[in-house]
Image (tube, rainbow, N blue to C red):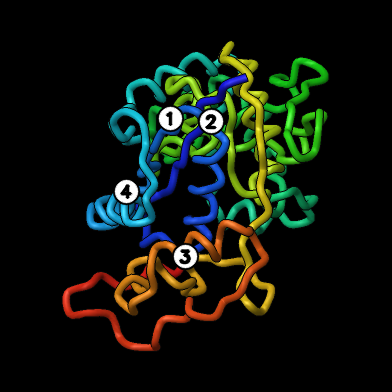
Amino acid sequence: MTHTTRFAPSPTGYLHLGHAFSALFSRARGERFLLRLEDIDHTRCRPEYAAAIAEDLSWLGITWDGPIRVQSAHAAEHRAALQQLRPWLYPCFCTRADIAAAGGAPQGPDGPIYPGTCRGLSQAERDRRIAAGTPHAWRLNMARAIPGPLFFTDLTHGRLRCTPETHGDVVLARKDAGLSYHLCVVCDDAAQGITLVTRGEDLLPATSIHRLLQHLLDLPEPTYDHHPLLLDEHGKRLAKRDGAPTLRSLRAAGVTAAAVVDRVGGGAGGSWEGLRPPQTPPARGEPPLDRR
């Protein structure tokens, strides 16, 4: 079977070795390989990071098919999907402080599960608060949305049963922050005809949410392949927030693209020798590394 895969970074910082591994992993598994910029976080995404993504991938020798899909340019499609989900949504007026004050919430894959404070509000009360301009999010009512057993196929883990209920009533949109990653990624994968979703194993739990949204929106079910995360020499996951070596800093230090490909091509194995850029300050005018 031929597959269409994609690499979908967020332009919130420069690509690092972990991104290189993920891009190469995805490229190797797709006869058709697409590039998408997931730039819906308007507070942290920056055009210079978006431009650097294409530059860094080209330096590595990674090419992609067709134009780059910019997620924020398809907001109308995402909003239409949200509207399609309205039968399973409810407005939530809780602030983060409200949720924290509730206390005692069970833990899910992403932290405390929302206790459902606003789930039981009457329609009249919901309408009153919305009319008054009270900020709110739209949450998915899991108890109503889950149709019964759902499954997805992962090339590493096999056929797995979905457990979206472990995430609680997830937020799909916020009045002050737009639509959620979960909704946008599902819509974009379907729009781009992605048949094999390749990504880090840290996103394996989120696949249950995505499979449920695919069912509710009547979208195709892709196959998944969640790869191991690339680790540093101390066994710690590479991350922007921890200052993982960026591809541009390695390039500036004289590291060749071939050396990077050789290092990350073996996943967590291989040597870090030659891939430690000198500890120098960023060049004048270069934006600081995002350390989320």
Measured in 3D between alpha carbons, the distance from the residue under mark 2 to the one under mark 4, in whole angstroms, is 23 Å
In-image side of 255 versus 183 (left or right): left
Q: Nearer the viewer, mark 3 or mark 4?
A: 3
Residue 217 lies, with reference to residue 274, above or below; the image says above
State the residue in front, 175 or 265. 265
* Badge number at residue 42: 4
Q: Is residue 210 above or below residue 220?
A: below
Among the two numbered marks 1 and 4 on one chain, the one whose residue lies closer to the N terminus:
4
Which residue is most to the left?
285
**Label 3 vs label 2, nearer the camera:** 3
Residue 100 locus on image (x, y percent): 65, 58
> What residue did someone put label 1 on?
130
Residue 176 in view in this figure: no
Marks 1/4 in contact by CB < 8 Å: the verdict is no
From the image, state whether disc 1 or disc 2 is nearer to you: 2
Which is nearer the N-term, disc 1 or disc 2? 2
Distance CA(mark 1)–CA(mark 2)? 9 Å
- Determine whether, in the image, residue 22 is placed left or right of residue 67: right
Disc on the earlier residue, 3 or 1:
1
Q: Which residue is mark 3?
A: 260
* Disc 3 to disc 1, C-alpha distance: 52 Å
Element assignment for label 1: helix
The residue drawn where x is 55% and y is 25% is 3
The residues tagged by marks 3 and 4 sit, at their Cα atoms, a distance apart of 31 Å
Asked if the residue under mark 2 is in contact with the one under mark 3, i.e. CB atoms within 8 Å, the reply is no
Q: Nearer the viewer, residue 102 or 194?
A: 194
Q: Mark 1: which amino acid?
A: Ile
Task: Give coordinates of residue 39: x percent, y percent.
Answer: 35, 44
Q: CA distance from mark 3 to mark 2?
A: 47 Å
Residue drawn 66% across and 63% down? 268
